[in-house]
Image (spheres, rainbow, N blue to C red):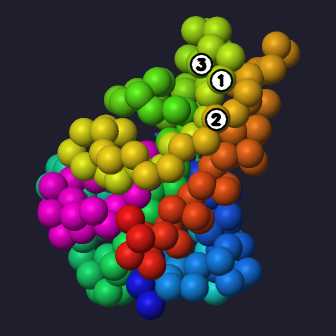
Amino acid sequence: MKRIAVLVSGGGSNLQALLNAAQNGQLPHGQIALVVASKPGVFALERAQKAGVPATVVARKSFANTAAFDAALLEELQKENIDIVVLAGFLSIIGPAVLAAYPGKIVNVHPSLIPAFCGDGFYGLKVHEAALARGVKLTGATVHLVNEITDGGKILLQKAVEIKPDDTPETLQKRVMEEAEWQLLPKAVAMLCAGEM
Ligand code: GAR
């Protein structure tokens, strides 16, 4: 059984998709053992509590520099014997200490078809605003391994989602989550836990 940590910064709907998958037996080789939030008060923490999963806050701004933040995050992961780290809307950058401790074991979900609309500054609604501004007809989501390049690691799974003429960033974000992210992320995590990726 692989011990999974899910790192969150906001609403935590992707965390919920993982919790539901675990509940439904779709994560047979993994256990969600820890939730780490990048700030207090986020709704994702309530989801963790409701599911009975231990949760903690590691906030970048509580630390003097990124190295101290990186060390604190690594300590939380190691304290819980975490094997696999899932970034589910986590908006802080993962530092070299955590990357070195988990080579090929950190995954991120990004709300576009990488390499479109990704990299520094592309997160959350901004990604969908950019896709609509460019006028693309298809977007989607990507689950990829995390390395030192923002959204630059090996692509594991992708799914396309159609853009509709009357989409707003909000309606598009919702459809990309429902049709792609909430399906791809549990699937990729299950495969990683099973040693299939
Ligand atoms: C999701 O759409 C996720 O793909 C995105 O933030 C949202 C978090 O929602 N992540 C990024 O943009 C990372 N670059 P959630 O808190 O409801 O899961």
Residue at 65% x, 77% y is: 26
What is the C-alpha distance between the residues marked 3 and 2?
A: 13 Å
Question: Which residue is under mark 1?
Answer: 138
**Residue farthest to the right, as pictured:** 166
Q: Does the magenta stretch include residue 40?
A: no
Amino acid, disc 3: Ala
Question: Between disc 3 and disc 1, whose residue precedes?
Answer: 3
* Label 1: element kind: strand
Question: Which residue is under mark 2?
Answer: 160
The front one of 93 and 185 is 185
**Residue farthest to the top, as pictured:** 134
Cβ of mark 1 under 8 A from ligand 1: no
What is the C-alpha distance between the residues marked 2 and 1?
A: 6 Å
Looking at the image, in which quadrant does ligand 1 appear?
top right
Question: Which residue is under mark 3?
Answer: 131
Amino acid, disc 1: Leu
Left or right: where 99 falls relative to 112: left
Q: Do the CB atoms of the residues marked 2 and 1 lie less than 8 Å apart?
A: yes
Residue at 59% x, 18% y is: 131
The front one of 167 and 125 is 167
Q: Could you classify mark 2 by the number of other residues whose Cα lies within 10 Å: few (under 14), some (14-19), or many (20 or more)? A: some
The residue range painted magenta reads 90-109
- Quarter of the view holding residue 183: bottom right
Residue 189: in sight, yes or no? yes
Residue 46: in sight, yes or no? no
Question: Between disc 2 and disc 1, whose residue precedes?
Answer: 1
The front one of 7 and 131 is 131
The quarter of the picture where the N terminus appears is: bottom left
- Quarter of the view holding residue 69: bottom left
